[in-house]
Image: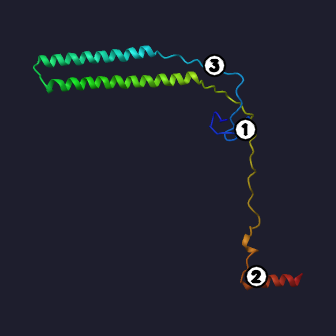
Amino acid sequence: MFCPTCGAEYTQKINYCKRCGANMATPTNSVEVHVPRPRFAAMFWAIALMALVGLITCFTAFDSFADEGLRGDHLIVPFVMGLLFIGAIAGLLIWQLSRIVSVFRDAVQTPKVTSQVTLPPQPSYQTPPLAAPTDPISSISEHTTRSFDPVIYLEAEKRRQRD
């Protein structure tokens, strides 16, 4: 089982995602998504018309170059380059159209249902401002290490004698 929001995987059935808190239960009221169908036929015919106009232009240019007296490589090279250019543009447009069709097909097969989960308002906890310490905080190592300062030992010995 995977979380629909963050993608975390869980082996047991749970109600809420432990990572992001999303609702893991299947929604009871599903929302139908109506995606307008793009006009794929119109796009295809537009590509075909563009390729046909390009081919006619290429053949017209070939004929006008031949009438001007170009022969051999001077005539064939621009003609072949024009055909390759028209073919490349048509191929790229068909490739883009196939991508649009596949995205549309995937969207229709697996519609994404988004449901808004309203969580109860969380109480806001404010920590009281900390007061400045009245006594200096002693060091942790003050009572655990031995000091070689004789004044400390003399003061401790005087305190013991008073008690």
The CA span between labels 3 and 2 is: 82 Å
User: What residue did someone put label 2 on?
Assistant: 152
Answer with the quarter of the image where residue 33 lies: top right
Q: Is residue 46 above or below residue 159?
A: above
* Viewer-nearest residue: 7 or 20: 7
Task: Name the residue at 67% across, 41% down.
Answer: 19
Q: Secondary structure at mark 2?
A: helix
Answer with the quarter of the image where residue 122 lies: top right
The quarter of the picture where the C terminus appears is: bottom right
Q: Is residue 131 above or below residue 136?
A: above
Q: Secondary structure at mark 3?
A: loop
The quarter of the picture where the N terminus appears is: top right
Classify 10 Å Cα crowding around label 2: few (below 14), some (14-19), many (20 and above): few
The CA span between labels 1 and 2 is: 63 Å
The outermost residue toward the left is 69
Task: Name the residue at 72% across, 36% down.
Answer: 16
User: What residue did someone put label 1 on?
Assistant: 12
134 left or right, relative to 76 = right
Circle nearer the viewer, 3 or 2: 3
User: What residue did someone put label 3 on?
Assistant: 32
- Amino acid on which disc 3 is placed: Glu
Q: Secondary structure at mark 1?
A: loop
Classify 10 Å Cα crowding around label 1: few (below 14), some (14-19), many (20 and above): few
68 left or right, relative to 27 = left
Circle nearer the viewer, 3 or 1: 1
